Amino acid sequence: MALYSEKVMDHFRHPRNVGVIENADGVGEVGNAKCGDIMKIYLKIENDTIQDVKFETFGCGSAIASSSMATELIKGKPVSEAMALTNKAVAEALDGLPPHKMHCSVLAEEAIQKALQDYYARSGATPPADA
Amino acid sequence: MIYLDNAATTRLSDTALQAMMPYFQEQYGNPSSLYAFGQQAQEALTAARTTVARLLNAADPREITFTSGGSESDNQALRSAAYMGARKGKKHLVSTTIEHHAVLHTLAALEKEGFAVTLVPVPENGIVRPADIAAALRSDTCLVSVMFANNEIGTIQPVGEIGALCREKGILFHTDAVQAAGHLDIDVQAQNIDLLSLSAHKFHGPRGAGVLYARKGIALTPLIEGGAQERGRRAGTENLPAIVGMAAAMEEACAHRAENAARMAALRDRLIEGLSAIPHSVLNGDKERRLPGNVHFCFEGIEGESLLLLLDDAGICASSGSACTSGSLDPSHVLLAIGRPHEIAHGSLRLTLSPDTTQAEIDRTVEEVGRVVIYLRGMSPVWRDLEAGKTPFVIQ
C-alpha cells in the first residue's frame, strides 16, 4: 500500500517486542481510545540500561509500526539514550510517515518518556537534569 | 483477491463495456454538432436519457440531466432547490445527520450563504423517523434531503413516506440515491421524489457519469457555465461513452435486480451471522432494512485501519469508517450519529458485496476477519483492560 513505506509495513506486519513485562521497572501509557490510539510501554532496567522493552498498542498501522520501531531503537541502550529518543528519530527510522500520521511517532516518544518517568518515580533515582 | 468494497466502486460490467466501446473510436462525434455524424451521437445521448428516465419512472426524459457523478448531482440539487426557495423568501433546509459529505458539505456552504439548516438525528437503527422530519419542517422550509440508503451502514430510509409528507406541504424533496440505484426499486413518481442523484459506478457502470433527476418545473442552477448542453443545466461536452455505459449498466442492474438482491442478501446474512460470532462485535444499522450487499460491524478493542491493512494482506479488499483511513482524526459521522462512542466507532469494518460475490469468499472472509480481530486484540492495551475487567465492555 503506497500510504506507508516498506519499513512501516514491515514493522506493522511483524511488530517487534509485542507483549507485557511482568514486574516491569517502568510502565507508560499514552493516548486515548477516543482518538483511536493508545500505546503502552513496559521497561526492564538494570545497570542504567534498557534490558528489555515490550509494547501494547491500540491503533492504526503507523501507530503499531511506531511502537515497534521505538522499542527497537531503545532496547539494550543506556537509559540516557532512551530519554533522548525523539519522534523524529522514530519516523526517520521508519523511512518517514505520512504527515497526518506523524502524531503516531509523537505518541511513541511520549510513551517511552512516561515509562522512564515511572521508572524514576519508583526507583527514587533522580532523572538527568535535561530530561 | 476477494473484493468486498462495492459501495466504494464496482467492476464495470461486460454489457456496459460493450455498449461503450463504439463511442470511443467509431461514434466519436460531438452531440452538439449539426452534421449527421454528430447527430448520431445526439441520438445515443437521447436513447440513454430515455432509458434512465424509464428505469426511474420519470414522466419525461427531459427531467434527466447527465452529470459527472453523485457528488455533482447532490451539489446541484441542493443549490438549485435552495435558490428556488430563496426567491420565495424560504431559506430553511432540512436533512439528516447521516448524509454523505456531498450533501453535508453543500449544506454547510449554503449555511454560510445565509440559509438555515436543520439536521435531523437518527435512532440507533440508522433509519430516520418520518415524524422527526415532519417535526423539523417550518413555514420557510424549501427543501428536505434524505438519502435513499446510507453509504456506510447500508440502512434504507423511508423515502416514500418522507416524499409524501413533503409533497403534501409543498416542499421540495431530494434524495441521494447513489447507493440505491440499480439495487433497490426506485419510482420517482410513486415515491414523490422531486430531485434524485445517482452515480453510474456504484452499479457496475463507468466512473465519471451520474444523473440528476429534477421533476418538471424545477429550475436547475448550473454549476458549470459555458454551453447549451443538457439544456443549459450543465455546460461541457457530454461524456458520451460513460453516459451510454451508465444506461446499459442501469438497464442490466434493474433487469436482474430482484434475483441479484435475493442472492446478495442471503450471502450478506451469512456474513452477518459469521461475524456476529466474534465476541464483543456489533452490526451497525438495522438488520433487515439494509442494502442487500451491505455488512457493517464494530469490533471492540481494535482500530479499523490495522484491520483493513491485515485483511488486505489476506487478499480481502474492505473499507472502514475509521478516522485513520480518511485522513481526519474523527471517526465516521454516521457511527457517531447512531450513538456509537468514539472508541467503538474507531473499530469499524464495512464489507459490501456484488452479485459476483461467492459463498466461498464469504466463508473465507468470516475466517480471516475473526483471525485478524483476535490478533489485534492480542496486542491491544484497551482489550487487555476490558478483559481484566478494569474497564467495562461497551459491546456485550
Image (cartoon, rainbow, N blue to C red):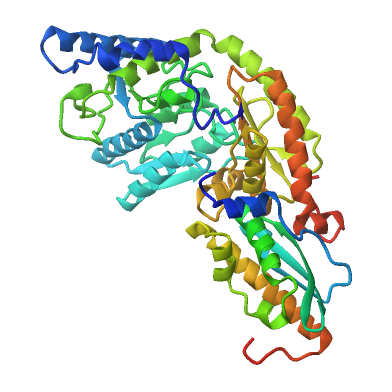
Taking the image as drawn, is residue B300 in sight?
Answer: yes
Locate residue B181 relative to residue B37 in the image: left or right: right
Check the image and report above or below for B50 versus B149: above
Check the image and report above or below for B241 versus A24: above
The residue drawn where x is 42% and y is 23% is: B200
Check the image and report above or below for B145 versus B328: above
Residue B113 on image: x %, y %: 30, 50
Residue B362 on image: x %, y %: 70, 25
Snapshot quadrant of residue B225: top left
Image quarter hosting the N terminus of chain A: top right
Locate residue B53 relative to residue A20 in the image: left or right: left
Snapshot quadrant of residue A81: bottom right
Locate residue A52 relative to residue B132 in the image: left or right: right
The residue drawn where x is 41% and y is 29% is: B173
Locate residue B385 relative to residue B43 in the image: left or right: right
**Foreground pick, B61 / A83:** A83
**Foreground pick, B115 / B362:** B362
